[in-house]
Amino acid sequence: MKDMAELIDGKQIAKTLRAKVKEQATYLSEQGVTPGLAVILVGDDPASQIYVRNKERAAEKAGVQAQTIRYDATITEAELLQKVATLNADPAIDAILVQSPLPEHINEQHLQEAITPEKDVDGFHPENVGKLFANRHEYFPIANTPRGVMTMLQHEQVDLYGKTAVVIGRSILVGKPMFSLLEAADASVSLLHRHTPDDVRHTMLQQADVIVVAAGVPKLITANDVKPGAVVIDVGINRMEDGHLEGDVDFEAVEPIASKITPVPGGVGPMTIATLLETTVELAARHHDVELEAGWQNI
Ligand SMILES: Nc1nc2c(c(=O)[nH]1)N[C@@H](CN(C=O)c1ccc(C(=O)N[C@@H](CCC(=O)O)C(=O)O)cc1)CN2
Ligand SMILES: [Mg+2]
């Protein structure tokens, strides 16, 4: 029988991280601090409804006070910006996020820039993106999905030093921050995207020790793309016509070749929400000048 890759169990790692967050939230509450998270949800995108509901539930269990502000898809950008300004000034709120995607008529970048960098729990503000890119040695929030991927790699004791990594997808949500985080961990990183020719992608993937794919293309990565022993992280969540979820990796084909692989569902997805709570607790501690134990989130 062929060796199968070890499964990276994101659900389990996220559970462990959420328990750590709860410990810190309890410590904060002993200091009179309740971490406050505000989520802005616009429109009725069915997936966003589920993700936001899951955020509310996870927050409540972890001792984070979450509030969702829901708007019809017809709301204007000016009204949203006004709400963000109110939340920026609200001392009960430590963390603000605007659920993505937004309706066409709203410029997502305007909202990303409106959230004060100190409450920017998604790490999308240009100031926080810039600090990440510049490898600044100070605290700042980092996008939760790529940060969650780094937690998974650390949990799995994947040593990135001197390794070759390929990231597919260049969004502000995943690809760009993922590039910076892997580079900061001393991997040699290539960032590929939809305009990378297929043969170039194939050649580069075959050299990669670590692959992170966030392309939104079901089963884009297949067996002959992957070097034996590579670590494969699948950020893709594609809802197929019959309702089942498919990643960007052809899991059955790649599992016998990779050394470690994330499933979909149950891989990166759950880490996004656990990491959101991790970042919220960190921001609350900073706003209230409470020192949390260094490295509390190491799992
Ligand atoms: N402002 C933001 N918007 C969006 C983000 C984000 O980080 N900030 N990420 C995604 C959506 N997302 C959280 O917001 C998210 C996506 C997926 C999951 C998850 O647990 N997925 C499950 C499958 C769930 C399903 O059945 O669909 C899994 O992969 O196991 C959690 C959060 C886009 N928007
Ligand atoms: Mg508070």
Image: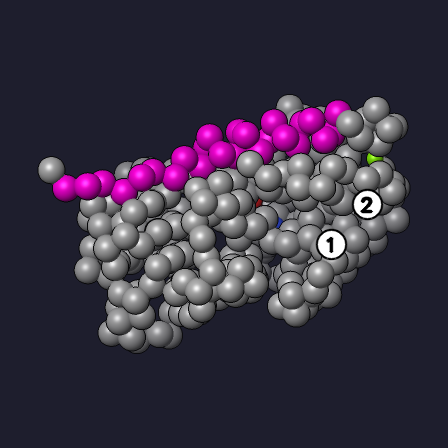
Q: Measured along the vertical axis of the image, is residue 15 above or below residue 130?
A: above
Using residue 151 as the reference point, say whether residue 164 is left or right of it. left
Q: Is residue 51 visible?
A: no
Between the residue at mark 2 and the residue at mark 1, the CA separation in whole angstroms equals 9 Å
Figure quadrant of residue 228: bottom left
| Residue type, label 2 | Arg
Stretch of the chain drawn in magenta: 2-26
Q: Classify mark 2: residues with Cα within 10 Å, few (<14), some (14-19) or many (20+).
A: some
- Quarter of the image for residue 133 reads bottom right
Is residue 207 found left or right of 42 in the rendered image?
left
Callout 1: SS: loop
Q: Which residue is painted at 53% across and 60% down in the image?
A: 185
Q: Is 8 included in the stretch rendered in magenta?
A: yes
Residue ID at (24%, 45%): 255
Q: Are marks 2 and 1 in contact (CB under 8 Å)?
A: yes
Q: Is residue 118 magenta?
A: no
Q: Secondary structure at mark 2?
A: helix
Which residue appears at 49% of the width and 34% of the height? 13
Q: Which mark is residue 286?
A: 2
Q: Quadrant of ligand 2?
A: top right
From the viewer's side, name the closer residue of 58 and 84.
58
According to the image, label 1 marks what residue?
139
Per the picture, the main secondary structure of the magenta-coloured stretch is helix
Q: Position of residue 254 (x, y in %)?
A: 24, 49
Going by the numbered disc 1, the residue's amino acid type is Tyr
Q: How is the image coloured?
A: one colour
Q: Quadrant of the N terminus?
A: top left
Write the residue at 52% across / 34% down: 14
